[in-house]
Image (spheres, rainbow, N blue to C red):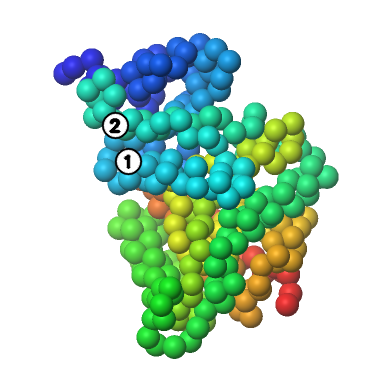
Amino acid sequence: MTDSDALLDDSFADADAAAALYELAAPDLPPPTSVRREATADPEIAIWAVHAKGSFVRMKVATSEPAVARLRRGATLLPTLAARGLRVPEAILVRAKPGGSSVTVALERRLGTTNAAVGWPILGAPGRIAFAEALAKGFSALHAPGASGASGTSGSATPPGEIPWRAVVEDRVRKRVGLLRDADVLSPESGSRTEAKLLEEASRLPVHLVPVLCHGTFALPAAALERRAFAGLSDFEGACTADPWLDVAAAVASLGDPAGAPSRRFLEVYGATMPLPADLSSRLDLYSGLVLLKSLCVVATAFPSEARTAAERLTGSWSLSGAHPTN
């Protein structure tokens, strides 16, 4: 095994190895003075907060081909989003196999000073409302291109620019429930009930819709704070083209109580700038279920017993009813 191979093995757990990997990936940047592991929603991408002289950088490390593809997708999107005026990190570089290793590394300037999920408890009630408002405006800006077409159509042939959205969602429901059944996270009975409930809600979706760029993951951990104010969004590795209300459901889920003041304010502000679909209530309930299934699938890969406990407590009970604005 080469030294670079050893770095690959250690880069997800050891700060010294991560610091050495950083120097291999960015030899022209100042060497790190401290390196700290960050939590991540993607178990295949490790994130390190790197402090170097005069700069704070986030280093993302991926090994598998799917994870590398997500890493490149996120890094490629950042300049485009910044050019549109969105507050996102500055991409520095993407480097494959630094020092002869088999990992791919992406570096970006750190956005803000604090992860919003970490800072959320200390914001207080007024601060959380203000953050929810700014977050909603950020998502409105992200979703703006083509968002007016997201209301969908009912024809059977896919019109130009649209995708067969109902079929896409039904496929996601079946695949995610199947993965959780196979991992023994959902029992056959619970899996069947969950699948039937979500498929029944999916049957009310538009057959086709014009998708927009969506962030694709929980909003709060991907948001940054600067002096307790919203500083922007990061971590676009899970970005996809979809119904923008899928992002909204994930954002509300990450804000805590869907009927709480921050969630309600988020939906009020977002709904004031985006067209509200007639089936909004049903759509948010369905998408919150998809968000829950996705999070359980992620947890199940590394912590199956915890995923089973969460599934027993949450599956079938999550609802955003009462939180959404009215037409």
Circle 2 sits in a helix, a strand or a loop, which is it? strand
Horizontal side of residue 139 vs 100, given as left or right: right
Query: In the depicted view, which residue is nearer to us: 260 or 146?
Result: 146
Query: In the depicted view, which residue is nearer to us: 55 or 85?
Result: 85
Q: Residue furthest left?
A: 1
Residue located at (54% from left, 67% from top):
146
Residue wearing tag 2:
96
Horizontal side of residue 302 vs 99, given as left or right: right
Q: Quadrant of the C terminus?
A: bottom right
The amino acid pointed to by label 1 is Val
For disc 1, the neighbor class at 10 Å (few under 14, some 14 to 19, many from 20) is many
Of badges 2 and 1, nearer the viewer stands: 2
On screen, residue 62 above or below 2: below
Residue wearing tag 1:
68
On screen, residue 326 above or below 101: below
Tag 2–tag 1 contact (CB < 8 Å): yes
The amino acid pointed to by label 2 is Ala
* Image location (x, y in percent) of residue 7: 29, 20
On screen, residue 299 above or below 276: above
The answer to whether any part of residue 308 appears in the image is no
Residue located at (70% from left, 65% from top):
273
Circle 1 sits in a helix, a strand or a loop, which is it? helix
On screen, residue 152 above or below 299: below
